[in-house]
């Protein structure tokens, strides 16, 4: 038996290392290399809600889309819906690993009906990445969370393949959110997305982009929450994401309880063949510790299984300050 075999969203994967959504996963030749090197599944580059609505002729009438206008028209020229459905069909023909389609959205709007076409094109699952900045002083937090719940309900009306929600880092009670999503038949969550963040150049007095790529130390936030939520919402599959750059980072996330680890920045920095290096590092670690399957050690270090689970809760620097004078 293949010791790295796993399931994710009810799908069978040869390894727990998943190529995360990005420009790289919009290129079938790169996806073929990723499969050869040991990717367990691929999340295709995202289609944008604004793009779907623009092509459906609905965008002009809506005020919900902050990025509407020339940018979308430009983007849509090079990335039409038909091209996206064609990408799903092509990749499905060329690789055996599960192919997960991806949508970036800002609402639980009409675009959800379109998800059925992704399913019909052969997508094995759909990953939904909803993100908006709540900025209204008169709207309570719960109202924003309700948007996620209505999205879960709406998308389930249209598709039968598994669904994963890719989430940002800013939720007050993530455990509640995940439990509610699970009750609405969301099969998995990706913790966490990493967004395009701004920076300021104080000399030139203008905005610039912060580093697009993560570093290995960015893993900590995800590691904490994977360890906590996998012991509290046990049936929800969790894909760890952000800061996973080598095989040891994959092992850490599996020990925390993740079902799979999603990888992006390091594939830009070292190329898709780095997946092979990561896979061999996981295999070697399992051999060194005499594990024959992922289930033998998955979650061994999660919140529920630690004698002192408080290590996951501790966030103040008390210990650090007491030891450093
Ligand atoms: C250049 C680039 C493009 C990305 N494009 C997408 C995208 O289209 N959709 C999406 O859901 N995430 C996108 N992401 C986020 C990644 O899928 C991933 O969640 C994030 O980068 C954190 O993982 P990492 O630390 O391994 O990079 C992108 C990331 C990068 C660096």
Image (tube, rainbow, N blue to C red):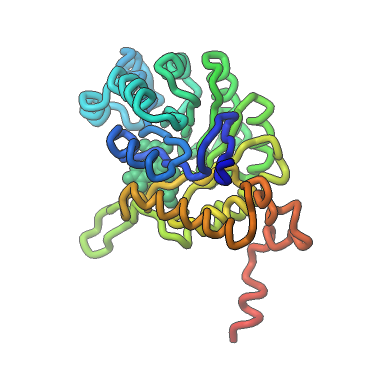
Q: Point out the image quarter for the C terminus.
A: bottom right
Answer above or below: position of 321 versus 250: below
Horizontal arrangement in the rendering, residue 111 relative to residue 321 (left or right): left
Residue drawn at x 69%, y 63% as measured from the top left: 311
How many circles with numbers are drawn on the protein?
A: 0
- Asked whether residue 194 appears in the rendered view, the answer is no
Percent position of residue 39, x then y: 43, 41
Q: Residue 277 versus residue 226: which sits nearer the camera? A: 277
The spot of residue 37 in percent (x, y) is 39, 45
Q: Residue at x 59, y 35 (%)?
A: 7
Query: Residue at the location (69% across, 27% down)?
Result: 183
> In x, y percent, where is residue 196?
37, 46
Residue 88 appearing in the image = yes
Give the residue at x 58% y 56%: 286
In front: 201, or 11?
11
The residue lying furthest to the bottom in this view is 325
Residue 266 vertical position relative to residue 181 in the rendered view, above or below: below
Which residue of the protein is positioned furthest toward the right in this rendering?
307
Report whether 35 appears left or right of 8. Answer: left
Q: In which quadrant is the N terminus drawn?
A: top right
Q: Is residue 11 above or below residue 321?
A: above
Q: Depth check: 302 or 122 in front?
A: 122
Ligand 1 quarter of the rendering: top left
Quadrant in the rendering for residue 150: top right
Q: Give left or right: position of 49 versus 285.
A: left
The x, y position of residue 247, in whole percent, is 48, 56
């Amino acid at each position: 038996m293949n010791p790295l075999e796993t399931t994710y969203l009810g799908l069978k994967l040869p390894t727990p290392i998943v190529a995360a959504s990005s420009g790289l996963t919009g290129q079938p030749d790169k996806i073929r290399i990723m499969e050869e090197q040991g990717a367990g599944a691929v999340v295709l580059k995202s289609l944008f809600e604004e793009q779907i609505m623009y092509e459906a002729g609905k965008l002009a009438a809506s005020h919900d889309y902050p990025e509407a206008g020339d940018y979308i028209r430009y983007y849509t020229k090079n990335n039409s819906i038909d091209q996206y459905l064609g990408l799903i069909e092509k990749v499905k023909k060329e690789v055996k690993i599960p192919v997960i389609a991806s949508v970036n959205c800002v609402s639980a709007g009409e675009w959800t009906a379109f998800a059925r076409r992704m399913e019909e094109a052969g997508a094995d699952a759909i990953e939904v990445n909803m993100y908006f900045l709540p900025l209204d002083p008169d709207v309570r937090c719960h109202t924003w969370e309700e948007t996620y719940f209505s999205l879960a309900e709406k998308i389930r009306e249209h598709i039968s393949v598994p669904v994963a929600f890719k989430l940002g880092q800013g939720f007050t009670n993530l455990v509640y959110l995940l439990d509610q999503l699970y009750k609405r038949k969301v099969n998995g969550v990706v913790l966490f997305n990493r967004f395009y963040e701004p920076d300021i150049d104080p000399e030139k007095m203008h905005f610039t982009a912060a580093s697009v790529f993560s570093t290995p130390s960015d893993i900590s936030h995800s590691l904490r929450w994977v360890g906590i939520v996998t012991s509290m919402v046990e049936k929800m599959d969790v894909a760890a994401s952000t800061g996973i750059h080598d095989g040891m980072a994959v092992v850490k996330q599996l020990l925390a309880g993740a079902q799979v680890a999603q990888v992006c920045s390091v594939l830009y920095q070292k190329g898709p063949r780095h997946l092979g290096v990561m896979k061999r590092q996981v295999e070697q670690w399992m051999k060194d510790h005499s594990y024959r399957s992922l289930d033998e050690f998955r979650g061994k270090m999660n919140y529920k299984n630690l004698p002192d689970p408080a290590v996951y809760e501790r966030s103040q620097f008390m210990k650090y300050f007491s030891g450093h004078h």
